[in-house]
């Protein structure tokens, strides 16, 4: 029996997996158990921004592994404090809560928004506005925020009080507002839903609505944050600040960690005992977070992302012109969707066979989430293989 068959025997079949079994990574390449090499243009779904085996990262995590890995949140640890300072400064917000995943970040953010509403209205009946085609996680709370019936239908009853508006349509949001609206949650660039960026007018419009009505604006930057779109937080490109931002994926570059970060006004609503996590922000993962921030800065990774993405966009423009099945591309920085007029799955498999790993987003979009450390040569390699597969 091969590795793949063995996996199929023992794993719950919650995923449709490729039959490639991965073994190790080096730089921006992955290798399978048979020695085949793959150019990584998905980073474990936008997680491994530094690629594989980045020396300063490995060194910092290894050192922490030998020093202290876990203590619970009854105690502070130095790596956690250092990471907290860096997250708060980078987001230009006030207080952070570390958790273990993106879903937990969105759950925690929603709890904080609800607590604020509760203190103000003395009742726990707040509503939240989310968006069609959004993605916020798979727990019974976060999956309700996820505006995609396919992920929800078998798992009810789910959390109450969620309404869905249409991205980039402010009127659709206004139509759902009530006296009970406590939060609006949105991805500045929808990831799973097809790589759909918010327009500036729309996100600024949401900020204005939330300011006027004292509603909590939660930005889910689990996928688009941490430099992926060319700025450390995507919302800096929109000239707004959220009340709470959700982070995960790229914040740990491979160790399981998430966070939500709140401004002073909302942070004040949380009191000891309101929320918790056994592992959340343990010294091992926060040492990783801390070193990720240091590396991004010291090695100008976000600047590299911006520069290489401009080159990628020029090349994608040419691809759009050359192939009838490619309708366009959209996204920000190194979070790009190649929009096809046919299902994308076949091309994703063909690229894998050619030695390039990408993912889909929605049915007809090939999603590119390469490590932020790629060079123009890697873009050339990708484009050559993409053209071969499209042709
Ligand atoms: C991946 C993702 C999540 C969920 O993160 P998990 O770590 O899988 O729980 C939430 N929001 C967005 C925008 C995501 O891309």
Image (cartoon, helix red, strand yellow):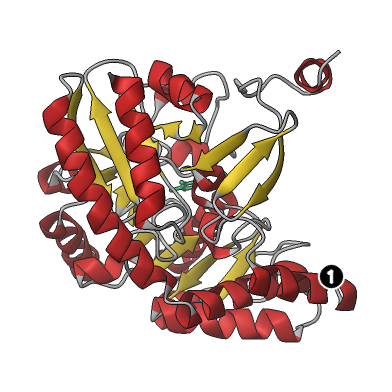
Question: Where is the C terminus found, in terms of image quarters?
Answer: top left
Q: Position of residue 375 (x, y in %)?
A: 40, 58
- State which quadrant residue 347 falls in: top left
Q: Is residue 347 above or below residue 187?
A: above
Q: Secondary structure at mark 1?
A: helix
Is 319 or 198 nearer to us in this picture? 319
Is 315 or 348 nearer to us in this picture? 315
Q: Position of residue 56 (x, y in %)?
A: 65, 74
Mark 1 surroundings within 10 Å by alpha-carbon count, few (fewer than 14), some (14 through 19), many (20 or more): some
Give the number of marks. Answer: 1
346 left or right of 73?
left
Q: Position of residue 15 (x, y in %)?
A: 62, 24
Q: Position of residue 313 (x, y in %)?
A: 22, 49
Is 293 or 121 nearer to us in this picture? 293
Q: Is residue 319 above or below residue 200?
A: above
Q: Let me know if residue 324 appears in the view.
A: yes
Distance from mark 1 CB to nearest ligand 1 atom below 8 Å = no
Question: Where is the N terminus found, in terms of image quarters?
Answer: top right
Q: Let me know if residue 193 appears in the view.
A: no
Residue at x 30% of width, y 38% of height = 337
Residue at x 20% of width, y 66% of height = 238
344 left or right of 326?
right
Q: Is residue 12 above or below residue 145?
A: above
Q: Kindly identify which residue carries mark 1.
A: 65
Residue at x 59% of width, y 39% of height = 139
């Amino acid at each position: 029996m091969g590795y793949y068959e063995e996996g199929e025997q023992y794993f719950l079949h919650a995923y449709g997996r490729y039959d490639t079994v991965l073994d190790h990574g080096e730089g921006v390449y992955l290798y399978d158990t048979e020695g085949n090499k793959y150019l990584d243009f998905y980073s474990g779904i936008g997680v491994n921004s530094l690629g594989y085996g980045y020396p300063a990262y490995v060194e910092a995590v290894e050192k922490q592994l030998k020093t202290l890995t876990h203590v619970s949140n009854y105690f502070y640890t130095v790596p956690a404090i250092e990471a907290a300072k860096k997250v708060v400064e980078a987001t230009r917000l006030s207080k952070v809560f570390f958790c273990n995943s993106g879903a937990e970040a969105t759950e925690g953010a929603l709890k904080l928004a609800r607590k604020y509403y509760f203190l103000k209205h003395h009742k726990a009946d707040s509503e939240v506005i989310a968006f069609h085609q959004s993605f916020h996680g798979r727990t019974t709370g976060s999956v309700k925020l996820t505006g995609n019936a396919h992920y929800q239908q078998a798992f009810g009853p789910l959390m109450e009080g969620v309404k869905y508006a249409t991205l980039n349509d402010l009127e659709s949001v206004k139509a759902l507002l009530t006296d009970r609206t406590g939060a609006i949650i949105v991805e500045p660039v929808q990831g799973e839903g097809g790589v759909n960026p918010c327009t500036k007018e729309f996100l600024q419009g949401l900020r204005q609505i939330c300011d006027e009505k004292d509603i909590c604006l939660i930005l889910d930057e689990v996928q688009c944050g941490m430099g992926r779109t060319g700025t450390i937080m995507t919302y800096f490109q929109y000239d707004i600040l959220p009340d709470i931002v959700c982070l995960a994926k790229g914040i740990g570059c491979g160790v399981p960690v998430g966070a939500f970060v709140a401004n002073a006004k909302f942070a004040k609503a949380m009191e000891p005992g309101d929320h918790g996590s056994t592992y959340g922000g343990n010294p091992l993962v926060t040492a990783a977070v801390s070193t990720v921030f240091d590396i991004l800065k010291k090695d100008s990774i976000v600047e590299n992302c911006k520069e290489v993405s401009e080159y990628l966009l020029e090349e994608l423009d040419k691809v759009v012109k050359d192939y009838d099945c490619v309708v366009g591309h959209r996204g920000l920085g190194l979070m790009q969707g190649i929009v096809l007029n046919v299902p994308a799955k076949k091309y994703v498999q063909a690229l894998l066979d050619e030695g390039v790993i990408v993912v889909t987003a929605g049915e007809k979009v090939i999603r590119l989430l390469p490590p932020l450390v790629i060079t123009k040569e890697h873009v050339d390699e990708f484009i050559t293989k993409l053209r071969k597969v499209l042709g």
